[in-house]
Each structure stands twice: as structure tokens, then as C-alpha cells.
Image: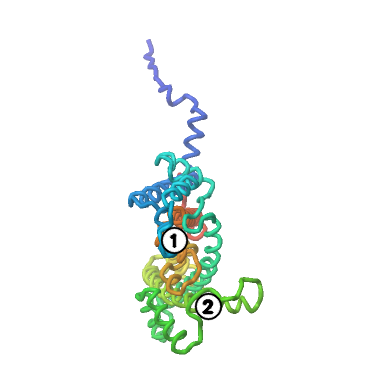
């Protein structure tokens, strides 16, 4: 009688997968979805911290503002407590803390930051829009120039085949990265605005000049932006150049560089397609992080030159304890920075083919 063996098959191996489970696994396994969820988590945690911290001080921003206005008028106004209660009710500060938090998250989801305490009845959104234009214009130009000049100069300085005189010509500019931006601003203000009287040293345009799309106003605006832009640019160029130079030095010792040189490829092709492209990835990461400065500007530089950007507005909001204005500006910075890093993570494969987000 022939021996027969019966093989038992695990039912879990033959059963059809649950379509709901498969969809959920594919959904959360997608890199873009996971990266977007991380973006939302980052914004929520930051929003919670920003909501809690100002309220730990125990200060009443409405009474602080009314007391400041009374001191400016030379006397204490009667009925201040009633006025403070009225304003607190209109701003929602008289509600329980948990209800304030729920309303705060709901308004944040609509990008509505409420009314400003210092500039009531103006909204924080209006103040941010008015200020962000100046910071964005100033920082976009300076960041783009600093990145292009610094990265290009750092690539040439780190390239072993570059002429020797280039190092002697550009190395002094690298030392400026160790000097704070506001210190450079003070030096240039003293030299160009006070001693030589060539450039204005405060404001974004001349007093009495109204913003308009005219050649005279644009030229006046550019003259006022030269000193703050140079103080940021000279300090940032060295930062980008030093980082790119170090990456270029490390890249030249890689095997693919030796192989490209052994093949007899053109020197320019090796420099651009092999050395610069592989050394550029950390620079792009730094550029994404620097996107936050497009909105904040350089706070101390804007305060020094009385430039009406978002950094100067944030400085004044902190001075007067304007919770809503501080929250709106800081959350604008955090959202823009988190979005920039998420975006740069998604375009990494376009920059460096070695980066893959697909699962094998």
C-alpha cells in the first residue's frame, strides 16, 4: 500500500487580502502621505506650544495695552477694568482655556489669526500681509544672490584644478560669515550713511513718499534697501561658500570621481555633472531651511534699520505682549518652514538619482 502524505496549507497564505487593509497599508506606506502627516503633526505641536507659552507668563495683554496707552496720555484712564473686560470678551480671552484652545485650532485651520491687541480693530492677517511684502522682497534677493555666489565660489575654491589666485581673492570674504549681520549693518551704517552720507540708514522709503508703482519710488526703495541687503548678503555668502567648499573636497576622493577621470572625460563635465551635482545636496537642504528667513527677514537687521518687515513687526509685538500677533507671525514662519522642508524632501530624487523613496 502506497504511503500518502497530506500537506496542510496555512489558510492565511491562501486567503485573499482584505481590500480595506490593503488600501490602508498602501495609503500610509506612500512616502508623500507620510511626509504630509508629519507636516501636520509638526504644525500642531508648534501651535500648541505657542498657545501655551505666552499664557504661562500670567500677563493680561489687554490691561498691559490699556495701561501703556494711559501712561502715554499722562494719566490713568477711568474705567480701565471695564474696558479690559469688554476687549477681552471681544477677543475671546474671557473664555475657559480649553475653549480658547479649540477656537484657536479652528481659526488656525482657516489661517485666521484674529484681531491684533496692539492695533485693534486691525486683524493680524492684514498686518502680516503688509509686513511680509517688505521682508519677502528683501530676503528673496539676498538669499538668492548669497546662495548662487556662495555655492559657485565654494565649488571653485574646493576644486583642485582651480587657479591659486582665486583662493587669495575670495578667502577674505569667508571671514565675514563669522560676523553677525547686525554688526556688519552697524559698520556700514556708520561708513556709508553717517560718514559719507551716501545712503539712507532707516526706513524702506523716504518720509512723505507714498508707496506707488513709479520709477522714482522704486529707486528710492532700492536705495533704502542697499544697506540692510548688504549686511545680510556679505554675512551669508561666506556661509554658503564654506559649506560647498567642504563638500567639494570630500567629493573629489570618491570612486566615481576617480573613474570619471580615468575615462578621460572633459574637466568641465566632471566638475559640473559629477562633483557639483553630488556636493549640492546638503546645500539644497540648507536652502530649504533658509526659506524660513524669506518671511521673518533678519529680525535684528530690520530693527536696526527700522525696516518695516515681518521681523521688525514681530519685535514690536513681543514688546507690547500682543499674543495674537506673536502667534500669527510665528505660526506663519513655522508653516512656511515646515512646508519648505517637506517640498525639498519630495524633490530630492530629482536632484540626486541615488535617493529613492519607493519600497522594494
Q: Residue furthest top?
A: 1
Quarter of the picture containing the C terminus is: top left
342 shown above or below 242: above
Lower sequence index among marks 1 and 2 = 1
**Spatial separation of the CA atoms under disc 1 and disc 2:** 31 Å
- The residue nearer to you, when weighing 93 against 5, is 93
Q: Out of 63 and 348, give the one closest to the viewer.
A: 63
- Mark 2 surroundings within 10 Å by alpha-carbon count, few (fewer than 14), some (14 through 19), many (20 or more): many
Q: Secondary structure at mark 1?
A: helix
Q: Position of residue 186 (x, y in %)?
A: 40, 79
- The disc label shown at residue 224, or none: 2
- Dividing the picture into quarters, in which one does residue 320 lie? bottom left
Q: Crowding at label 1, few (<14), some or many (≥20) Cα neighbours within 10 Å?
A: some
Question: From the viewer's perspective, is residue 330 above or below residue 7?
Answer: below
Front residue of this view, candidates 191 and 139: 191
Q: Is residue 57 above or below residue 141?
A: above
Residue 223's spot in the image, x, y percent?
55, 80
Mark drawn on residue 125: none
Percent coordinates x, y for residue 349 in the rendering: 49, 56
Q: Which residue is mark 1?
A: 69
* Residue in view at x 53 percent, y 59 percent: 127
Res 278 visible: no
Disc 2 element: helix
Amino acid at each position: 500500500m502506497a504511503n500518502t502524505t497530506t500537506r496542510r496549507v496555512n489558510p492565511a497564505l491562501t486567503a485573499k487580502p482584505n481590500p480595506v487593509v490593503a488600501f490602508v497599508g498602501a495609503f500610509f506606506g506612500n512616502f508623500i502621505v507620510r511626509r504630509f502627516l508629519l507636516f501636520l503633526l509638526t504644525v500642531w505641536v508648534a501651535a500648541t506650544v505657542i498657545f501655551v507659552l505666552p499664557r504661562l507668563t500670567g500677563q493680561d495683554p489687554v490691561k498691559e495695552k490699556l495701561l501703556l496707552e494711559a501712561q502715554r496720555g499722562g494719566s490713568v484712564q477711568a474705567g480701565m477694568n471695564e474696558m479690559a473686560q469688554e476687549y477681552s470678551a471681544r477677543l475671546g480671552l474671557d473664555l475657559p482655556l480649553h475653549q480658547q484652545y479649540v477656537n484657536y485650532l479652528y481659526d488656525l485651520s482657516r489661517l485666521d489669526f484674529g484681531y491684533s491687541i496692539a492695533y485693534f480693530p486691525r486683524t493680524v492677517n492684514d498686518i502680516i500681509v503688509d509686513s511680509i511684502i517688505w521682508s519677502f522682497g528683501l530676503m528673496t534677493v539676498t538669499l538668492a544672490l548669497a546662495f548662487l555666489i556662495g555655492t559657485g565660489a565654494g565649488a571653485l575654491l574646493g576644486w583642485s584644478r582651480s587657479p591659486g589666485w582665486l583662493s587669495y581673492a575670495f578667502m577674505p570674504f569667508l571671514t565675514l560669515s563669522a560676523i553677525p549681520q547686525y554688526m556688519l549693518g552697524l559698520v556700514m551704517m556708520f561708513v556709508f550713511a553717517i560718514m559719507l552720507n551716501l545712503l539712507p540708514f532707516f526706513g524702506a522709503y523716504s518720509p512723505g513718499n507714498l508707496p506707488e508703482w513709479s520709477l522714482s519710488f522704486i529707486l528710492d526703495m532700492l536705495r533704502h534697501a542697499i544697506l540692510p541687503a548688504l549686511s545680510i548678503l556679505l554675512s551669508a555668502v561666506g556661509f554658503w561658500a564654506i559649506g560647498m567648499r567642504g563638500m567639494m573636497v570630500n567629493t573629489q576622493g570618491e570612486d566615481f570621481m576617480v573613474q570619471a577621470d580615468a575615462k578621460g572625460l572633459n574637466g568641465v563635465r566632471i566638475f559640473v555633472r559629477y562633483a557639483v551635482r553630488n556636493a549640492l545636496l546638503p546645500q539644497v537642504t540648507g536652502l530649504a531651511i533658509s526659506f524660513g528667513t524669506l518671511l521673518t527677514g533678519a529680525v535684528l537687521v530690520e530693527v536696526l534699520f527700522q525696516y518695516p518687515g515681518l521681523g521688525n513687526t514681530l519685535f514690536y509685538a513681543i514688546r507690547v505682549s500682543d499674543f495674537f500677533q506673536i502667534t500669527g507671525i510665528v505660526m506663519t514662519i513655522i508653516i512656511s518652514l515646515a512646508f519648505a522642508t517637506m517640498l525639498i524632501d519630495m524633490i530630492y530624487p530629482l536632484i540626486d538619482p541615488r535617493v529613492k523613496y519607493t519600497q522594494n
